[in-house]
Image (cartoon, grey):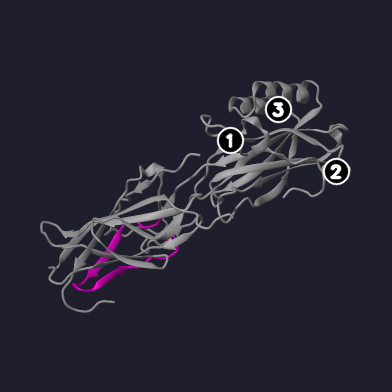
Amino acid sequence: MKKAMIMLVVLTMVLSVVVPSGLSGYVDESTGWDQEWDTDATIVLGGTTTGPGTGDPGVDAPEIEFAWVFPDEDLTKSGTQVNCVPSGSREDVEVKIIISDPNGLDDIEDVKAQIIYPDNVWPWCSCPKFKVSATRIESISTITSQLDGAKEAGLITGEQYDDIHYWVIEQPAWAMYVAYFDMWYCEPAGYYDVLVWGIDNAFQIGEVYSVGEDLAGSGGFGFEFVECLTLEYDFQSLNYGNIRPQVTQYIQGDKDLETPQYPTVKNEGNVPIHIRIKSTPLVMEGTQYEIDKFDYKFKGEIDEYDADVWVDIGPTLCVCNTEKLDLSIHAREGLPQGYYTGKFYMQIYLGSWGGNCE
């Protein structure tokens, strides 16, 4: 399984600029993991501030001959790899099923498929996803193209291709069915199994076929939902406004991605995210005067940090979760009045699911 590499995200924004509501950005592979924000503040002196069916398989029940999952989006790896769509869903995940029945194909009443979540990701822990009914594919050209794609991806062998082609098209004792599943970004990355089975007109349930266990080209699993490490943010700058020496100045976050003046982050991928931040000193141009003391509050954790030091913030940001990010700075006594600017950096990397499946 490919592991997501640490993603450095340094988002560049002009902090003194007011950004229209609704503008947001992403920290992911497309950003080159390297973005930054400008930060600024103005010192002012004086004043104050504010599962499958039950029962044994029937003797004359339908029998699954082969099954595989498509599309395969990484032909360099065994089995099927399905990519995640950040903050979206995949509606094109297909389970192709080759089935027969000792009493003829007209005896097949229904063909079912069910996805099983990864066995090592808490809290899913091998839980079954909903069952769906498959639809028979009648078109010979469609059947042939599906077989060609499976063979090209290494999901079936040449011998299996020939057997299926013969028994489905030339001497139709088998039939091809297809079932469709949606895969949402909120569902965990990992290795999924897929179970398929048939039911005949007498409601006899056929033996359950596991794609991960039974298909030679599967790689030992139904499909891999590939890791997608993506963080969405809404702030394009950080402007602390007017501050006074020895007074802490705050930027309050919220959980609304449409309010860029209140920092918000959201996990848009299918793995937990760990966040690190760093601030450079805010410096008055042409001088040695600087503000170098900062605080953050994230998911209930509050801590202070110094300039130019990477800091891991808060607990892991779980899939689908949106959180506010509160930030503050401290201007020491004796700093002269003027305009101070700096940079704010953020880095994300793969977090831990937590819990266990035992």
Tell whether label 1 touches label 3 (CB within 8 Å): no
Q: Which residue is mark 3?
A: 143
Badge 3: few (under 14), some or many (20 or more) residues near its Cα, within 10 Å?
Answer: some
Q: Which residue is mark 2?
A: 204
Q: Give the Cα separation between the discs numbered 3 and 1.
A: 19 Å
Tell whether label 3 touches label 2 (CB within 8 Å): no
Q: Earlier in the sequence, mark 2 or mark 3?
A: 3
Q: Nearer the viewer, residue 169 or 129?
A: 129
Kind of residue at badge 1: Thr
Name above or below for residue 214 compared with residue 251: above
Kind of residue at badge 3: Ile
Q: Which residue is mark 1?
A: 80
144 lies left or right of 299: right
User: Under tag 1, what secondary structure?
Assistant: loop
Quarter of the picture holding the C terminus: bottom right
Name above or below for residue 326 compared with residue 187: below
253 lies left or right of 134: left
Which span of residues is magenta-colored? 233-258
198 lies left or right of 309: right
Percent position (x, y) of residue 73? 54, 34
| Disc number lying in front (2 or 3) | 2
Q: Earlier in the sequence, mark 1 or mark 2?
A: 1
User: Under tag 2, what secondary structure?
Assistant: loop
